[in-house]
Image (spheres, rainbow, N blue to C red):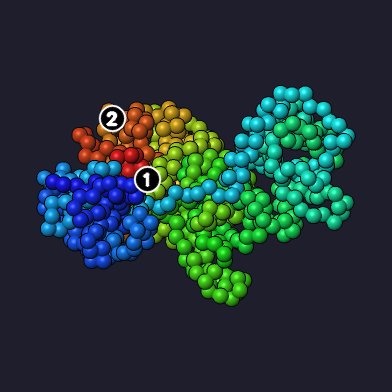
Amino acid sequence: MLQLAVPADHHAADLAGTRIGRWRGAVERFEPFQGIEGWALALDAPDEGVELELTVGEDAFALAVTFEPRPDLAPLLGFEGAFGFRFGPETFARLARLAPRRRALPVGVRVSGTDLFLRAPQNRAPSVAELVETWQSAVLGALKPPERQLGRGERLLARLAELRVGAEALAARPLRPHSDHDVGQIDGVYPGADGQVWLVGWMKRGVEAEAPAVIVDRRKFPAGLALLRYERPDLPTSAVGIIGLMDTNWPPAPAMKEGFVFLGRQGTHHLRIGAHTRILRGDAFLAAYAQVQSVAPGGPAEAFAAILHSGANWLPGNAAATGLAAESGVDRLLMLPGFGCFAEGWAVSPAKRVETFHMRLGDCVLVAEEGATTFRPRPDLQPVFGGTASPVARAGFQAVLRGGLPVDAGGAPLLRVVHDDGTMAVSRVEPKVLRRLDLVGDGEEVLRLFPAVRLEPFWRAFLAAARRSLAERLREPAIQALAPASRMLVLRLPGEPSNLALLFDRLAAEADVLPADAGIALLADLGRGRGEALLRFHDLKAALPNRPLSLLFLAHEDDALGELPDILSRLGAERFVHLGRGLVPTAEGWAAIGAALARRGHGLDWLEVVDDLGRPDRVDGAFTAAAFGWSAASFLQWSVSAPRFTRGLHRESGLPLNEAGERRAPGAAMRVERPRASRLADMVDEDLLAGRDRAP
């Protein structure tokens, strides 16, 4: 096989000295998005096209003819012509579909009807596998989003970091202020985020805008300094106003004393700081910057604005101060410690596209879950933003802001709107909007925001946070009266006064059925029935003078299965029967309770709950943790790993069902009140009971 020895750089001497017959040419590049390109000609017929074959091994794979003008070859050849050829980029896709056994074969370009091959780049014919790999890498790389280029603000911060390093050597030298080198003063200082300190003041003209600096304030602090200069009518013509940014670890003192900021690599000039220098609040600094930006356009101002928009800054109103029209508000903010917040609100930025949201609560920063942030139109905002529909077409948002929110998180919330170009706008959120999520009472609000909340990517994390929150909710009950007994009937009192009266009347009439040494513990809440419970308990003690009676008040209005181990321990109970809120024993039930309390051993007794028609309760369940009897030791062992529930209990609550030795008493208790209804609480309780909050 002959190969035309023409190098790709086409030097004239090479062209003249490598003549093989009548042909000249070369393959110049294998480019996945351009194709396979080169040139060829016949010296005796330069105006005629040359037919070429793309070969795989010795087999022709594709055909082409020279057709593209190549004026760049005219100085080398001495004449012009259409010598260029190209096998299109689809050739690479065809090569990728070849059988694996052909992957090792070389790919070349041959003059049709001959055995002459054009020289490949680097004088080596690539294999099919090499070209396919190059093509695949190029295509996959093109499908990836382009790497984000550093913005003006990030470039300025990087420059300041370099200048700060350069200031280390300056800080090691003795620095003394000379009156001839006094170039201005600093009137205000705003300590920003991440080692950023902003300056407001004035200085003489002619000082460089970016320089290493050393702050001398009790000791030396190296810094990188950038200055934004603008004209101030109150200054002489030889001076300008300045807004400065320093990268430094200098902590400005609340009350400034005399100090200096030395500028430049030699520290020749200095700015004065002293008692006249005030520590600025964020809003005061932004107000000063907003006035400056309008009269100091250009690169430095844009870089400063980008830094104020960056993720390190949480200055409310930063967008308006830098000339960006962006407004936002939060209508609903439901907080769950350890998880984050459910948020609903609006954000309008006519000049930019809103991409996502961040929120700051105290020292905790929350970030919107990408897959759970939705936008919707807010036509009610249209009159405020020019009367056109486009700015508010996706102004409304619903988001889950995730983060390790501590229980004691406080402070006024700050919402940061993040645009698609990376700029950000921070606004304050009304503190009264934030409230702790009630898994029962706020369930419909959560489901309105996220109807398929159980299918959302954050559901497992939400369950885990709910489990921790429910465990932390347990509080010791307040003891009104305590009468220990080894056998104990524990009754959670209903909330309605009429049902409360019914239960106390039944207690007074049927308590004699219980074993003589059995005690009765009544659990009330601090709601509207507290006073009634106290009065009724006083009357019950008079009616049952020999019965151990206890009264405890709970901090919530739900069932008390979670507090029951502590209550049983305080009462010294060895065997107990538990009746949840809204249950009143029937005539058969009193006998079943007495039998359960008199029972020896650790067997479980289930008391069937019926509705007001005497039928098994199909709503909340007939055999549930709302009505059962057990030994205190067995219940305590079970409680170690038992889940907590939003309303105290859920169905059987994980108690062992169908155990050997269990007994079931039909029609033992009647349901007179139902737990608070909540679809979200039902979902949470069901999944907590199934252990779906744990990682698979």
Residue 318 in view of the camera: no
Q: Is label 2 in a helix, a strand or a loop?
A: loop
Q: Earlier in the sequence, mark 2 or mark 1?
A: 1
Q: Judge the density around disc 1: few (<14), some (14-19), many (≥20) Cα neighbours within 10 Å.
A: some
| Image coordinates for residue 422, horizontal then vertical, percent | 53, 53
Q: Please give the label number shown on residue 460.
A: 1
Q: Residue at x 27, y 37 (%)?
A: 656
What residue type is disc 2 on? His
What residue does disc 2 label? 602
Query: In screen coordinates, is 329 left or right of 291?
Result: left
> Which quadrant of the view contains residue 114?
bottom left
| Image coordinates for residue 352, horizontal then vertical, percent | 54, 62
Query: In screen coordinates, is 493 left or right of 694?
Result: right
Q: Is residue 240 above or below residue 277?
A: below
Viewer-side residue, 471 vs 691: 691
Viewer-side residue, 692 vs 598: 692
Query: In screen coordinates, is 377 left or right of 188?
Result: left
Viewer-side residue, 493 vs 199: 199
Q: Residue at x 37, y 31 (%)?
A: 640
| Image coordinates for residue 570, horizontal then vertical, percent | 46, 29
Residue furthest to the bottom: 387
Image quarter of the C terminus: top left
| Image coordinates for residue 557, horizontal then vertical, percent | 48, 48
Q: Judge the density around disc 2: few (<14), some (14-19), many (≥20) Cα neighbours within 10 Å.
A: some
What residue type is disc 1 on? Arg
Residue 457 in view of the camera: yes
Q: Is residue 396 above or below residue 298?
A: below
Q: CA distance from mark 2 to mark 1?
A: 36 Å
Q: Which of labels 2 and 1 is toward the front? A: 1
Viewer-side residue, 290 vs 9: 9
Q: Residue at x 84, y 36 (%)?
A: 181
